[in-house]
Amino acid sequence: MTGGRWRWLTCLMLVAAWRAPVKAQTVEVAGGSGLSSGKGEGSFASSYSPPFPFVEHTSLASQEVTAERDGAPVMWASLTWFPAAHVGVEGRVDYRRSGLHGANGPYVVSMTYIARQPPDFIAREYAYDSSADWPETSGHTGQLNATAAVVLRVGAPKGPTLRLLAGGGLTSVRGRFEPVGYSTFSLGGHSVLFADEHRLSMRLGSATTIGLATGAELHVPVGGHAALVLGWRLFVPRQMELEVTADGLAASDQGINSVELEEVQRTLAPSPLRWRPVTSDFVAGVAVRF
């Protein structure tokens, strides 16, 4: 449906609500849980020059880490006002914490450096190249949606009803993922090269963006003022950029020495993670009418 048709539908539903008699007004509070199956995926590209203190060198390390979201439980709550028998306005919040996974390409390091090795200790250029298989991504994201929607109610208010919803709102996302490669080099006795490879955990800074919300729900009365709720909700946000910050060593770290996170962050200078966290939720719960 185009943006113009969305606006026309919303306007017609609001006009119907405004012209409705006051005596038809009701308020509903609802909440429950469900399963969020919406797929969100992104990738993080790392390209930096590994540190090699006090040695003349040129170096480049690169990799791409992918992150794909798993299905997860979702918790939700809503408040709906019906100024008319068949038209209302709903405010809703929902939250899900999803695991991350993703297959990754190799972690590649290439370097040339100047060293004086025995027996003559003459300065010469040496090369170092490495391509290491990289483990799958792990981590999580937390996502909070807050939406407002116009509700069209089909059926008698006190009987089974079908609800159709259209609106928009905000989504906020944050999280953490690992591992990301980070290498440092040093020279030992007789100019022997020592390479130290770390695996880092990265934090995704909180970011917020807008999006469109829609869905459908079936409400089945189970008492004088209560009803069971079964439904589906879709939220389609704009693409967002999450700030990436080195957070510590990953659980799979195989490095020898500790790392200073501030120095790591300056060296990596990581680009934001581009992400479009669409959510598709199958929900169930209970609604109470006042």
Image: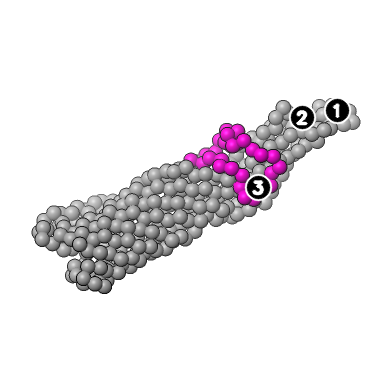
Q: Residue at x 74, y 34 (%)?
A: 186
Residue 286 visible (yes or no): yes
Q: Amino acid at mark 1?
A: Phe
**Residue 25: x, y in percent?**
15, 59
Which marked residue is nearer to the observer: mark 3 or mark 2? Answer: 3
As drawn, is 6 to the left or to the right of 72? Answer: left
Q: Which residue is mark 2?
A: 114
Of mark 3 and mark 1, the one earlier in the sequence is 1
Q: Which residue is mark 1?
A: 121
Where are the magenta residues, as a range?
A: 243-271
Asked whether the residues under the numbered discs 3 and 2 touch, taking CB atoms below 8 Å apart as contact, a structural biologist would say no
Which marked residue is nearer to the observer: mark 3 or mark 1? Answer: 3
Of mark 1 and mark 2, the one earlier in the sequence is 2
Residue 253: give its label: 3
As drawn, is 128 to the left or to the right of 284? Answer: right
**Residue 107: x, y in percent?**
65, 46
Of mark 3 and mark 2, the one earlier in the sequence is 2
Is 272 one of the magenta-colored residues? Answer: no
Q: CA gap, disc 3 to disc 2?
A: 29 Å
Q: CA gap, disc 1 to disc 2?
A: 11 Å
Q: Residue at x 52, y 44 (%)?
A: 203
Is 257 one of the magenta-colored residues? Answer: yes
